[in-house]
Image (spheres, grey):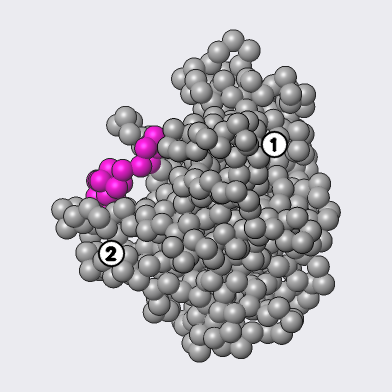
């Protein structure tokens, strides 16, 4: 499969990989037809998806199954009026219907907007109107369905709401009945061009609502490196990435690069993460390749890893935040497997990584992916020297990397701010050592990374400001051993509430945020102050709050 898309697939060394890796981009590339249906034709009985859940259910889907079910799903979506260019939001947790839906929407040429099940009414309304979403496909969970239903009066573009069950209330389309009764699928004459938008994510910013990161149909080709040369997959691999399908990491680790490589994607659909259960899954199903954020590994090493037979594990990768060397050493001692770090953004594919030919340095992201022209730029525009901090940027004057985002949808100003003069500015700061390894320092803005989530202060501040007790507030990240960072709210109270400052009010404000926006965004630490540090122009100086916290 890979031979069609790479000038060379096997590399003798890191130097060979850096010099000779090149992606071949076909005209009008569509992952659904070329890769999913391609495998179905070549090896129909090969298992594409091994799905299980915390209720003990288990289903294997071959590539032939995936072609059949995605054809039926595409036909069903067409019968609902979904066509090329239409925006469709998927709120599906880790349900296998996510794979049916995303591949089906690719086949139609529609735009997929994966979303977390933690979104509330307010979040859904914003997204529906910002992207002019036409349909929402949701997990049939009572709370999810309620949030979607509550959003509809303020979301005029939404024409169809589809439930995959178990609940299918009145007014909802029944996904499974729909695909069972679907007419034979007829492929559109021209489902897409390479430049059309196929996938869009809402990502957190620090100065406004989430941005819409738009990717073209060539985006999956950028994940060949992710699956083949970072996860180190082959046709015998059984790969597990820990990620909800609402987050970008899902298509990084549960779809594109894995199926390019011919690997089987393993999905454990669970409501609550427990390290013991995850380790049992690895043991029971004999997972060969595993990828997760550092938070997951931190929880796992607190278990007695020697109690589990993890001998099937051949390769492990890690991303989301810098890795603590103690975690690396503990996992290596227990399993004999080295954790290979990587780095990227919603706007990109894997941009920096520790590749198979390299010896990992715990805490280092690795070296630049040769598909990208990466540089470190100092504040005065120079290329940073070894040991000197600079912003990670992608240079596009020589070539446009496959996998780099197309634009911030409907926001030319933000697109130009990040992408100008043939340079994409990641907003991430790092330094490079004498061996060429990159080491992450932090964001140039204030995005908080907690348990693998990227959380923009503005979203949490907006939720807090709707409570009558709050006059002003600032959201910052506080270092945490388990989660990487936790959210802290520094709050100026209204006169009527100043006397009530205490644990009871803290709990009330935390519950208010959980109800107003996605629950994972609530502040675990709240401090009441008389005033917030500000610039002359009146902007809150979150950096000053972080500095004060570091002294405590």
Q: Is residue 547 left or right of residue 412?
A: left
Compared with residue 444, is residue 367 higher up or lower down, i.e. above or below?
Answer: below
Residue 423 inside the magenta-drawn segment: no
Q: Residues within 10 Å of mark 1 (few under 14, many from 20)?
A: many
Residue 149 location in percent, x, y?
A: 63, 20
Image position, residue 441 (x, y; %): 54, 71
Residue 240 visible in the picture: yes
Question: What's the CA distance linking mark 1 and mark 2?
Answer: 40 Å
Q: Is residue 280 magenta?
A: yes
> Given the current orientation, which residue lies at the most extreme top position?
170
Q: Earlier in the sequence, mark 1 or mark 2?
A: 1
Circle 2 crowding by C-alpha within 10 Å: few under 14, some 14–19, many from 20: some
Query: Could you say where residue 82 lies in the image, as x and y percent from the top left?
Result: 72, 29
Marks 2 and 1: in contact by CB < 8 Å? no
Residue 55's x, y, as percent?
A: 32, 29
Specify the quadrant of the image occupied by residue 222. bottom right
Report the residue marked by disc 2: 331
Say which quadrant the C terminus sits in. bottom left
The residue that mark 1 highlights is: 127
Determine the residue positioned at 83% across, 56% down.
413
- For the residue pair 244 and 267, the one nearer the viewer reads as 244
Counting every numbered tag in the picture gives 2
Q: Is residue 94 above or below residue 152?
A: below
Q: Kindly identify the residue that appears in the image at 79 percent across and 58 percent down.
A: 537
Q: Nearer the viewer, residue 503 or 338?
A: 503
Left or right for 32, reference 254: right
Identify the residue shown where x is 49% and y is 20%: 142
- Front residue of 355/152: it is 152
SS class of the residue under badge 1? Answer: helix
Q: Residue at the spot x=31%, y=43% of the render?
A: 274
Q: Which residues are magenta?
A: 268-286
């Amino acid at each position: 499969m890979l031979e069609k898309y790479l000038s060379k697939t096997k590399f003798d060394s890191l130097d060979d990989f850096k010099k000779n890796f090149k992606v071949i981009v076909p005209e009008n590339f569509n992952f659904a037809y070329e890769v999913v249906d391609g495998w179905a034709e070549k090896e129909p009985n090969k298992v594409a998806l091994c799905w299980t859940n915390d209720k003990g259910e288990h289903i294997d889907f071959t590539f032939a199954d995936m072609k059949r079910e995605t054809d039926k799903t595409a036909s069903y979506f067409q019968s609902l009026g979904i066509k090329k260019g239409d925006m469709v939001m998927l709120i599906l947790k880790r349900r296998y219907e996510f794979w049916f839906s995303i591949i089906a929407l690719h086949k139609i040429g529609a735009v997929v907007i994966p979303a977390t099940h933690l979104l509330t009414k307010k979040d859904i309304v914003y997204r529906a109107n910002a992207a002019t979403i036409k349909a929402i496909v949701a997990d049939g969970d009572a709370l999810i369905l309620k949030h979607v239903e509550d959003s509809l009066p303020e979301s005029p573009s939404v024409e169809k709401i589809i439930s995959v069950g178990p609940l299918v209330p009145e007014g909802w389309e029944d996904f499974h009945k729909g695909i069972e009764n679907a007419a034979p699928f007829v492929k559109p004459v021209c489902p897409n061009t390479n430049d059309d938008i196929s996938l869009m994510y809402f990502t957190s910013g620090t100065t406004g609502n989430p941005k819409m990161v738009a990717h073209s149909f060539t985006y999956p080709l950028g994940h060949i490196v992710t699956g083949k040369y970072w996860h180190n997959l082959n046709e015998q691999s059984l790969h597990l990435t820990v990620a909800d399908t609402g987050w970008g990491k899902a298509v990084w680790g549960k779809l594109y690069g894995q199926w390019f490589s011919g690997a089987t994607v393993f999905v454990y659909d669970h409501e609550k993460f427990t390290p013991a259960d995850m380790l049992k899954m690895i043991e029971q199903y004999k997972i060969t390749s595993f990828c997760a954020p550092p938070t997951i590994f931190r929880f796992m090493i607190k278990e007695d890893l020697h109690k589990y037979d993890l001998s099937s594990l051949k390769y492990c990768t890690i991303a989301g935040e810098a890795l603590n060397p103690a975690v690396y050493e503990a996992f290596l001692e227990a399993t004999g497997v080295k954790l290979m770090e990587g780095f990227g953004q919603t706007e990109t594919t894997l941009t920096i990584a520790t590749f198979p030919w390299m010896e990992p340095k715990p805490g280092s992201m690795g070296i630049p992916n040769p598909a990208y022209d990466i540089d470190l730029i100092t504040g005065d525009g120079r290329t940073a020297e070894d040991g000197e901090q600079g912003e990670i940027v992608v240079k596009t004057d020589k070539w446009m990397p496959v996998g780099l985002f197309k634009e911030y949808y409907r926001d030319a100003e933000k697109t130009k701010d990040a992408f100008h003069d043939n340079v994409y500015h990641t907003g991430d700061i790092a330094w490079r050592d004498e061996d060429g390894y990159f080491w992450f320092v932090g964001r140039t803005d204030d995005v908080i990374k907690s348990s693998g989530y990227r959380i923009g202060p503005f979203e949490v501040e907006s939720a807090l400001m709707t409570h009558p007790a709050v006059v002003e507030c600032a959201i910052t990240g506080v270092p945490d051993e388990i989660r990487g960072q936790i959210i802290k709210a520094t709050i100026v109270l209204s006169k009527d509430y100043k006397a009530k400052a205490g644990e009871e009010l803290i709990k009330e404000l935390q519950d208010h945020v959980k109800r107003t926006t996605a629950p994972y965004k609530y502040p675990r630490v709240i401090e009441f102050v008389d005033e917030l540090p500000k610039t002359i122009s009146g902007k809150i100086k979150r950096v000053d709050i972080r500095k004060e916290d570091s002294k405590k």
